[in-house]
Amino acid sequence: MSVKLEPIVGRYTSFDIEGKRCRVYFEEAGSGIPLVCLHTAGADNRQYQHLMNDPEVTSKFRVIAFDMPWHGKSYPPAGFQDTEYRLSTSLYVETIMSFCRALELERPVVMGCSIGGRITLQLAHLHSDQFRALIGIEAADHQEPWYDTAWLHRGDVHGGEVCAALVSGLVAPQSPEVHRHETLWQYMQGGPGIFKGDLYFYRVDSDLRGKLNGIRTDLCPLYLLTGEYDFSCTPEDTIRTAQSIPGAKVTVMKECGHFPMSENPVQFREYLLPVLKEIAG
């Protein structure tokens, strides 16, 4: 009886982020154009496991998904026990750029969801000359918070279960049951206070309204894909954002919520494959 192994390979690498040495875990599959994938707040790179197992994608793209420091299998930097984790815009940008430099990636494509989608807008604004293309999933320049982060790091509350409960309504009703619960399980396993620390970026430090002028989509194409059932980053939020960025391409994804790559990978690929084909072409 032969053992069937998935093509995904996991590795660690170490590099400095804002002067602190970080040991970062990443997984990859495929070969060709580097495609760096950014997970959502409080989660990890498992959200992209279906993409890394898709031979139609990996035949042309080297899909790379990393756990940000403090997330998944990546460790916090030394001395973390004496600090409170807070993700800022500058720290997020430096983390992505440092990871790409550590792997010596030449003009990769970067794709991110939720906070990862929001940061692609900042990457387009600051570093469009260093990327082949940027794909923002559930991305907009700003959303008004609809949740109370005070519940996300308390000694009398199970933080993981609260995180999963908070985001459960963002999954589209058409998403297969198995993928819905896989997505929520990843949120249940987040480290203490990490979801709250990520949302500092989302709620406090990343209002990009009026700050995205000058983005050169002729140098670095920008694709924005948002699920029709996402009430956190609504299609209207994404369309409004794109109207301030000449050349940005918007797609509203039917039967998808806030986590399309993990909650409904089959539906998501129908929207992603044409984008990847255009980038590869």
Image (spheres, grey):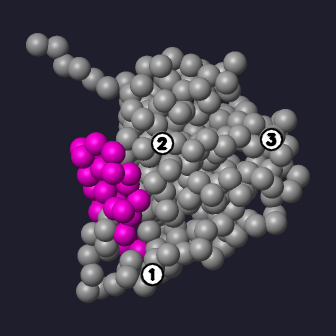
Tag 1–tag 2 contact (CB < 8 Å): no
Mark count: 3
Marker disc for residue 261: none
Examine the rendering and report whether any part of residue 140 can be seen.
yes
- Disc on the earlier residue, 1 or 3: 1
Quarter holding the N terminus is top left
Question: What's under tag 1, amino acid-wise?
Answer: Asp
Provide the secondary structure element on which disc 1 rests: loop
Question: What's under tag 2, amino acid-wise?
Answer: Lys
Image quadrant where residue 92 sits: bottom right
Q: CA distance from mark 2 to mark 3?
A: 22 Å
- Disc on the earlier residue, 2 or 3: 3
Where does the magenta region start and end?
166-194
Q: Which residue is mark 1?
A: 148
Residue visible at 74% across and 65% down in the picture: 208
Q: Is residue 105 left or right of residue 200?
A: right
Q: At which x and y percent is residue 144?
A: 59, 74
Q: Which residue is mark 2?
A: 254
- Disc on the earlier residue, 1 or 2: 1
